[in-house]
Image (tube, grey):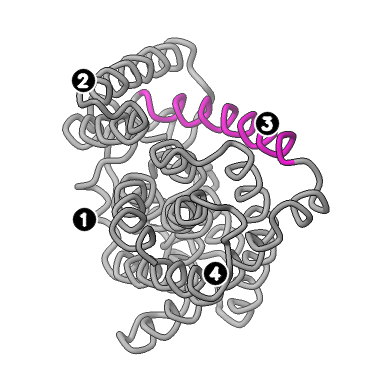
Amino acid sequence: LLLSADLRAVLGATRSLLVAFACGSVGTVAGTLVAYAAVPLRALGEDAWRVAAALAARHVGGAVNYVAVAEALEVSPSVVASGLAADNLLCALYFSTLFWLARDLPPDADGEGEGGKDKVKRGAEQGDGDGDGDAVGESGVKRADINVVHGATSLALSAVLCWGGVALSRAAGAPQFALVAITALAVALATAFPRQLAPLVPSAEGLSTIIMQVFFAAIGAAAGSVAAVLTSAPALFAFCFVQMAVHLLLALGLGKLLGLRKRDVLLASNANVGGPTTAAGFAAAKGWRSSLVPGILVGVLGYATATFGAIALGRGVLAFM
């Protein structure tokens, strides 16, 4: 996923949506602090502040960041599974809420979405490039069929990055930060060599999507039924609810204060809570073609930054509350 995380493209192509995403990220941090103070997680022991930090990462970046923070902070596997299961259930309700809030917002006028295609130029679009209906991947380039050579190359490159991240974390005496190191290496590589990596991105995204579905299935199987999660860790549902509610209220309030468009605030919030894939689906469903690529890019920015910010929040603030 992070092979498309070119930070220069993200910062250059998102403009007001980036401000809305920052407002949403502030809302997530504030929501985490409020939820941690309001909802007792004492039954989780030392895992309480750690899983709170992981859920903060989840609602700035995505599930990848949740797992990275949980591993770095050494959260128990059972709590990791329960936290993600509780969050996934509430995310479904949250996305429905966003659609309801956007019910009166019109789609783009004909031709308005054309500019979005020119915001990210990597020189590696696959295919003919004709038509507006081509699906767009998390990189912002047109999605294509998985190419065997490109797919194998992206897997090999990912393996090298994983090896390098694990080696660096072990050399630093902190093996639990392996995923953090891997994230940093991947983002640095994608930012330094975007044109060279661009041909690999469509195949890399296709493979990563398949692998992520396996990951979600494994998490769901480990967590068990919703009733079982409610019985084992009911406070996590309440925590996630309060966290998301404060996030949304602050995002809307700050957006109004700064004069941002409501659609940008809602799309950025979707990218915060769900990541680039759900943001793309939201923009496409609403007919916001001009916001499709920027929405994907701010979601990728969340992937690239959430892990580091959430670990700092956990160790610097939540651990002392």
> Residue 91, percent across and down?
63, 59
Look at mark 4 in the image and give the residue it sits on.
244
Distance in Å between CA atoms under marks 1 and 2:
35 Å
Read off the residue under disc 1.
12
Which numbered disc flags the more N-terminal residue, 4 or 2? 2
Amino acid on which disc 4 is placed: Met
Of the residues tagged 1 and 4, which is closer to the observer? Answer: 4
Residue interval drawn in magenta: 200-223
How packed mark 1 is, by other alpha carbons closer than 10 Å (few <14, some 14-19, many 20 or more), is: few
Residue 302 visible somewhere in the drawing: yes
Disc 3 secondary structure class: helix
Give the structural element (helix, strand or loop) at label 2: helix
The three-letter amino acid code for the residue at tag 3 is: Ala
Asked if residue 40 is positioned above or below residue 74 in the image, the reply reads: below
Give the mark nearest the N terminus, 3 or 1. Answer: 1
Q: What amino acid type should be assigned to the residue bearing mark 2? A: Ala
At 58% from the left edge and 68% from the top edge, which residue is drawn? Answer: 40
Residue pointed to by mark 2: 171
Residue drawn at point x = 45 percent, y = 51 percent: 50
Q: Is residue 259 above or below residue 228?
A: below
Label 3 or label 2, whichever lies nearer to me, is: 2
Label 3 vs label 1, nearer the camera: 3
State left or right for residue 6 relative to residue 310.
left
Q: Residue furthest left?
A: 192
Q: Look at the numbered disc 4 and give the secondary structure of its residue.
A: helix
- Residue 25 spot, x, y in % from top left: 37, 65
Looking at the picture, does residue 272 appear above or below residue 238?
Answer: above
User: Can you say whether 213 is above or below 33 in the image?
Assistant: above
Q: Which residue is mark 3?
A: 218
Q: Quadrant of the C terminus?
A: bottom left
Q: Quarter holding the N terminus?
A: top left
User: Of the residues under marks 3 and 4, which one precedes in the sequence?
Assistant: 3
